[in-house]
Amino acid sequence: MSKSRAGVYLSVILAMIFWGFTFVAFKYAIESFRPISIVFLRLFVSIFFLFGFALLFNRLGKIRKKDQKWFLLLALFEPFFYFLGEAYGLTLVTATVGAVIISTIPLFVPFAAFLLYRERLTLMNQIGLVISFTGVLMVVLAKSQGISTNPRGIILMLIAVISAVGYTMLVKKLADDYNPITITAYQSFYGMLMFLPMFLIMELPVIHIGAATTESVLAVVYLGVVGSGICFILLTIGIRELGASKANVFGNLIPVVTAILSFILLKESMPLLKILGILVVVTGLLMSQVSGNGLKKSSRRESFRHPPYS
C-alpha cells in the first residue's frame, strides 16, 4: 500500500473515531447547557470554522438562485430536525444506544433511493439490513427487564435518522454542482438561522455561559470544530479517493468507538448482549454495503452520501 493510500485510510478512520467521541462529548455538554443551546452554539462555532477553512483554501462555491430553496430544505432536514431529534433523544438514551441508532442511517438510504430514483437493493443489501436491525434490537433490549432505554428517546433518535435520509437525498441532487464543504458550510449557516429564534426566546434568558464547566465548554467547541468540521473534511478526502461506498463502510466503527468510550469515561454498563449486538450491527452494516449498498452513480461524479455522524 502506498503512503498516499495509507494516508487516505488513516483520514477516514480518524474521522470515524472522532465522530465516536461526539456522542460522549454531548453528555459532557449537557451538564451545563440545554439541548437547543448546545445545537445553536455548536453551529455557531462550526460556521466560523467551515467558512474560514473554505475561504482560506478557496473551496467556497457560490449558490445559484434556483438552488437556494434546496439548500433551505437541506438545512431544515439537517441540522434543524436532525439535531432536534438527536439532541433531545440523547437526553433520554445512553450514548451507546444513540450511536447505534444513528449508525442505521446507511440502512435506510437505499430504500429512499429506490423510491425516489428507482435504485434497487441487492440480496446482500437486504440480508445486511435484517442482520443490522437484529443487532440494534439486541443493544436496546440489553436488560432482561425489556427495553433498556426510554422509548421516547428512541423515537427522537429515529426522527434524526429520517431527517438524515432526507438530507442525503437532497445532497445527491446537489453534489454534482457543489463541493461537500460548500454544502456543509451553507446548510450549517441556514440551520443556525433556523435555530436562532428558539435560542433567543427559550435559551438566552436562562443561559449562563460564565457558570458553565470547562468540560462542557470544551465539549461544545469539539462538537462544532471537530464533529461538524474536521471530521467532515477528513471524510471528504476518503470519498474523493476511495469513493462514497468504500469510505462509508468505515462508519461502522462509530458505535464500537462510542461504546468503548462510554464504558471508560461515562461508566456505562457493557453487558455481553450489548457487545454481541454491536458486533451484529457492524456485521450487518458491512454486508449491506458489500455490493455498493444500492446507491449507484447517477451522474458524472459519485453521489456524496451522508456520513453517520453526530
Image (spheres, rainbow, N blue to C red):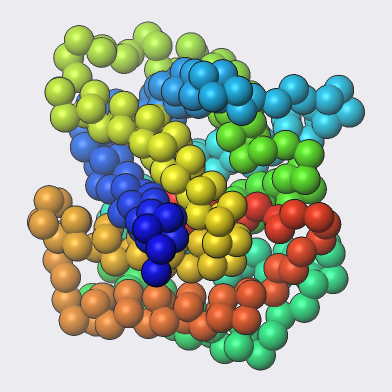
| Camera-nearest residue between 284 and 139 | 284
| Camera-nearest residue between 141 and 230 | 230
The residue located at (60%, 61%) in the rendering is 243
The residue located at (55%, 62%) in the rendering is 242
The residue located at (83%, 31%) in the rendering is 67
- In the rendering, at what x and y percent does residue 308 appear? 48, 56
- Is residue 194 visible from the viewing direction of this image? no
- In the rendering, at what x and y percent does residue 221 appear? 31, 27
Q: Which quadrant of the structure image shows residue 220?
A: top left
- In the rendering, at what x and y percent does residue 57 appear? 54, 24
| Camera-nearest residue between 211 and 129 | 129
In the image, taking residue 188 as reference, residue 170 lies left or right, namely right
| Quadrant location of the N terminus in the rendered image | bottom left
Q: Which quadrant of the structure image shows residue 212?
A: top left
Asked if residue 280 is positioned above or below residue 173 in the image, the reply reads below
- In the rendering, at what x and y percent does residue 176 appear? 77, 45
Asked if residue 291 is positioned above or below residue 310 in the image, the reply reads below
| Camera-nearest residue between 158 and 103 | 103
Asked if residue 235 is positioned above or below residue 186 in the image, the reply reads below
Q: How many marks?
A: 0
